[in-house]
C-alpha cells in the first residue's frame, strides 16, 4: 500500500482518497489535522455489524461503548477504550457511516508518545476531496475492498 499523488496504490489498483486537512507531516502532533509521513502497518480492522457484513475474517465488530482515547495525558492515549470514559475520546460507533469499516494503523501505537497523534485510520470519506483529521479516507466500496484485501501487517507507505 503506497500513497501517491493519484491516490492509494494497492494490489494493482489506485484508489482515490483524501488525507488530513493539515497535509502530510513528518512531525505529526495531536490535533494538527496532518497525515503522518512514514512506513506504517495495518494492525486491525473494525466494522459496524448492524450496517455491513464482516469485511475480513480477522475484523472485529464495533460494539456500543467502544471509543478511542485521544487525550495525550491519558495512560490509555491512542488506545481502544470503553464507555463510560472520562478523558477526551472519539466514538467509534458513529451516527454517520464514516467508521462503518475502519482499518487501524500502528501510528504511535502500541506504546504511544503523548501528543504525537492518535487514531490514524483508513475509513470512509464524507465526500470526495473532503479532508480528514489525519486519516486516509475512501469511497465506501473502496474501503470495503481494501479491508477485504489487506491482512494484519500490510505495509502502508505515506510520503
Image (cartoon, rainbow, N blue to C red):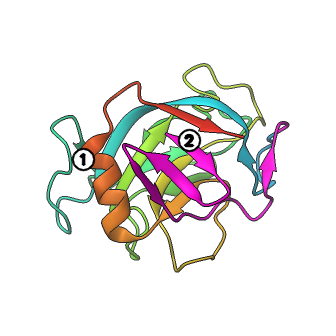
Stretch of the chain drawn in magenta? 1-27
**Pointer 1 residue:** 148
Rendered view: 40 above or below 10: above
Q: Position of residue 37 (x, y in %)?
A: 73, 38
Q: Nearer the viewer, residue 153 or 5?
A: 5
Task: Work out whether residue 93 can be spotted.
Answer: yes
Q: Extreme bottom residue here? A: 127
In the picture, residue 78 is in which quadrant? top right
Q: What residue sits 62% from the left and 76% below the top?
A: 129
Q: What residue sits 48% from the left and 51% below the top?
A: 122
Q: Nearer the viewer, mark 1 or mark 2?
A: 2
In the picture, residue 110 is in which quadrant? top right
Q: What residue sits 55% from the left and 78% below the top?
A: 128
Tag 1: Cα neighbours inside 10 Å, few (<14), some, or many (≥20)? some
Tag 2: Cα neighbours inside 10 Å, few (<14), some, or many (≥20)? some
Magenta span has 10?
yes
Rendered view: 112 above or below 92: above
Q: Nearer the viewer, residue 38 or 14?
A: 14
Q: What residue sits 77% from the left and 53% below the top?
A: 31
Q: Position of residue 96 (x, y in %)?
A: 41, 76
Q: Nearer the viewer, residue 12 or 53?
A: 12
Q: Extreme right residue here? A: 27
- Where does the C terminus fall, quadrant-wise? top right
Inter-mark Cα distance, 1 to 2? 17 Å
**Pointer 2 residue:** 2
Q: Extreme front residue here? A: 12
Which mark is first along the chain, 2 or 1? 2
Amino acid at each position: 500500500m503506497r500513497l501517491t499523488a493519484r491516490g492509494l496504490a494497492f494490489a494493482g489498483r489506485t484508489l482515490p482518497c483524501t488525507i488530513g486537512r493539515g497535509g502530510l507531516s513528518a512531525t505529526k502532533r495531536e490535533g494538527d489535522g496532518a497525515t503522518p509521513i512514514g512506513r506504517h502497518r495495518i494492525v486491525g480492522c473494525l466494522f459496524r455489524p448492524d450496517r455491513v457484513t464482516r469485511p475480513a475474517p480477522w475484523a472485529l465488530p464495533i460494539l456500543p461503548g467502544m471509543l478511542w482515547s485521544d487525550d495525550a495525558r491519558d495512560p490509555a492515549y491512542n488506545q481502544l477504550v470503553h464507555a463510560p470514559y472520562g478523558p477526551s475520546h472519539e466514538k467509534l460507533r458513529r451516527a454517520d457511516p464514516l467508521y462503518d469499516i475502519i482499518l487501524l494503523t500502528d501510528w504511535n501505537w502500541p506504546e504511544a508518545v503523548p501528543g504525537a497523534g492518535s487514531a490514524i485510520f483508513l475509513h470512509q470519506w464524507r465526500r470526495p476531496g473532503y479532508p480528514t483529521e489525519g486519516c486516509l479516507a475512501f469511497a465506501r466500496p473502496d474501503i470495503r475492498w481494501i479491508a477485504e484485501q489487506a491482512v494484519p501487517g500490510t505495509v502502508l507507505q505515506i510520503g
